[in-house]
Image (cartoon, rainbow, N blue to C red):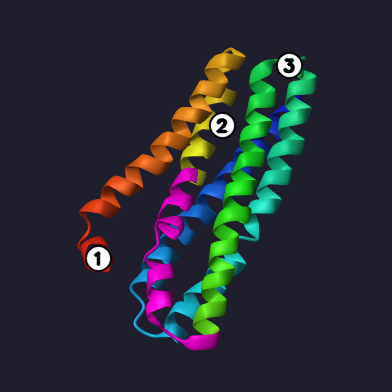
Amino acid sequence: MLLLHLALYVHLLALLVAFSASAVNHYLGARQRSSVTAEEALGHAAVMHSVVRAFPVASILLLVSGFYMAWKLDSLSAGWVWVAVVGLVLIGVVGDGVLGKHHKELAQELGRNGMTAKAREMLDSPVGRVTPVVVDTLVLGVVWVMVSEPSTAISVLTLVVAILVGIGAPLAVIRRSPTAKVAG
């Protein structure tokens, strides 16, 4: 029983690490968007790059501890377990694949050309503003699935709703923001 409690502790700790890194990234993203110079924006990007290194570690800890708990509790065959795993993979794909690529391209543009109109457009783009929220809502969806252990269909529906909310909420805010009117 002690190992099960330890696995749950590691699981929760990994979630705290991921949410903390996400909070720092949200803050730095806002600071980066308000940057006046390329050097300032690149400084925020360098810190963001360091912070995102926490995500793979948190993901591995979540997978290992989660599989251990599911194995010990004889839940490996439950559909919600596999939907949660798919959710974790989606978080990695969206976070690293989409957002990571965007940050890399932005850093290259800032480094090569400075704070150009293209760099400003990339800073204000929906990809950089929406994707972190989608990652957060997916995490919340996965947490809900793990806590409530619903049917496979409800688990899938939970992640679909999480993605839709993650896309819709920031887009509604962006459409109302003064910078969106200026940039658009």
Depth order, front residue of 118/152: 118
Instruction: Please tell me the numbered disc located at residue 179.
Output: 1
Q: Are marks 1 and 2 in contact (CB under 8 Å)?
A: no
The quadrant of the rendering that contains the N terminus is top right
Depth order, front residue of 118/83: 118
Instruction: Identify residue for label 2.
Output: 142
Classify mark 2: residues with Cα within 10 Å, few (<14), some (14-19) or many (20+): many
Instruction: Identify residue for label 3.
Output: 75
Residue 151 higher or lower than 135, as above or below: above
Q: Determine the CA span between mark 3 and mark 2.
A: 16 Å
Tell me the element at label 1: helix
Q: Going 63% across and 54% down the picture, which residue do you hit?
A: 97
Give how far across and how far down residue 181 sits, in percent: 21, 62
Tell me the element at label 3: loop
**Chief secondary structure of the magenta portion:** helix
Q: Determine the CA span between mark 1 and mark 2.
A: 33 Å
Q: Going 61% across and 68% down the picture, which residue do you hit?
A: 50
- Give the extent of the magenta segment: 112-134
Q: Which amino acid is tagged 2?
A: Val
Left or right of 129, for residue 91: right
Classify mark 3: residues with Cα within 10 Å, few (<14), some (14-19) or many (20+): some
Task: Give the label, 1 or 2, closer to the camera.
Answer: 1
